[in-house]
Image: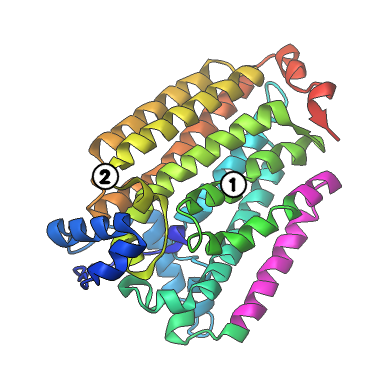
Amino acid sequence: MYLAKSISSKPLILPSIDNKKYSAKNKHLLHIHSNLLKNGLRYSTKVKPSFQQTLASSLVNKSSQKVQPYLKLMRLDKPIGTWLLFWPCGWSISVAAEAGTFPDLKMLLLFGSGAIVMRGAGCTINDMWDKDIDGKVERTKDRPLVNGTVSISDAWVFLAVQLSVALTILLQLNWYSVFLGASSLGLVIVYPLMKRVTYWPQLILGMTFNWGALLGWSAIHSSCNWEVCLPLYAAGICWTIIYDTIYAHQDKADDVILGIKSTAIKFGEDTKLWLSVFSCGMISFLVTTGILSQQTWPYYFSVCLITNHLYQQLKTLDINNPDDCDNKFISNKNVGLILFIGIVFSTLLKTKENHEKTILPNSSVS
């Protein structure tokens, strides 16, 4: 799973590829590999971790030696993935809040807990699928399932525990939301396989990671206003394709050799152009969501800030510098926070009349 990979400080060594074999199979991959051999990927000696990542890593490293491998298996030492999973939930819960009120704190805590557990379960599933692949990549070869600190059988038990906890959290919601939430499990399971069969695994990841944009609203209203939730969901998918394509550029050299597919390889040197398109898509869907949910000026101000963030991100992005890609990827947690704050203040300024226009019986399915 691209979200779970870490940065290696070691220089990348690219082996040669049999030109006849690869040119016959995929000339595009041969071209990418040749460019990487020619230009190389630029690694700095060390990536400066964020405060949150430093704190999380410190807590994991201080844990019991028996527990530590399982915490690393669920990526508890790398909280960025949890934030990226949580924010669409927070957006939806906030959009669904009553006019003039703050979002439901209990729901935010439930979804926050669910994000931690389900992100961990997703990483566990991913590592179980990718055990053999991870062992061939320098910066993933020390993962618990690869180095033997966790066995496959133990991983199955740990996965069952995580899914049981996730189900317990899900059962705190209404039945509409229980079924809606459970329906996303298929995406969680199949996502790790997608990078073997399509150059668009980031699309499947987007569909998976942004399911909370649908679930948050239904948790509040026991139904889903599709006119509002679908544009928000689509905006989240575009956002995920943006940040995970940037992240995937860190691994493109190894991925080409191993036959792993991604939008980073698909877009290649045209990555900035493609991501500009998805950035426009994200902003368009956010504006649509704002109009349909009767948002006030703080919401649109936050969308303007996000637009600037995406512009600056693409303007300064160096797709051949893994450290820069990692920093850009991590910065996307700020995008989620900015929109969340914008929605919260926008809702506080909304009138009850505008809120009632959003909760229309004929636009929801119960």
Span shown in magenta: 154-180
- Residue in the image at 44% along x and 34% along y: 278
Q: Is residue 216 left or right of 121 when viewed as pictured? A: right
Q: Quadrant of residue 18?
A: bottom left
Q: Can you give x and y, in whole percent of width and height, for residue 106 in the image?
A: 71, 45
In the depicted structure, whether residue 334 falls above or below residue 142: above
Q: Is residue 351 highlighted in magenta? A: no
Q: Is residue 364 visible to the viewer in this orientation of the structure?
A: yes
Instruction: Mark 2 vs mark 1: give the one in front.
Output: 2
User: What residue is shown with label 2?
Assistant: 269
Q: In the rendered structure, which amino acid carries the disc numbered 1?
A: Met
Label 1 crowd bin: few (<14), some (14–19), many (20+), radius 10 Å: many
Q: Can you give x and y, in whole percent of width and height, for residue 319 in the image?
A: 26, 48
Residue at mark 2 to residue at mark 1: CA–CA distance: 25 Å
Disc marking residue 320? none
Q: Main secondary structure of the magenta part?
A: helix
In the depicted structure, whether residue 149 falls above or below residue 327: below
User: What residue is shown with label 1?
Assistant: 207
Q: Is residue 16 left or right of 305 when viewed as pictured? A: left
In the depicted structure, whether residue 199 falls above or below residue 90: below
Q: Is residue 50 visible to the viewer in this orientation of the structure?
A: no
Q: Can you give x and y, in whole percent of width and height, for residue 25 in the image?
A: 36, 63
Q: Is residue 160 highlighted in magenta? A: yes
Color theme of the render:
rainbow
- Nearer to the camera, 143 or 320: 320
- Nearer to the camera, 268 or 364: 268
Q: In the rendered structure, which amino acid carries the disc numbered 2?
A: Glu
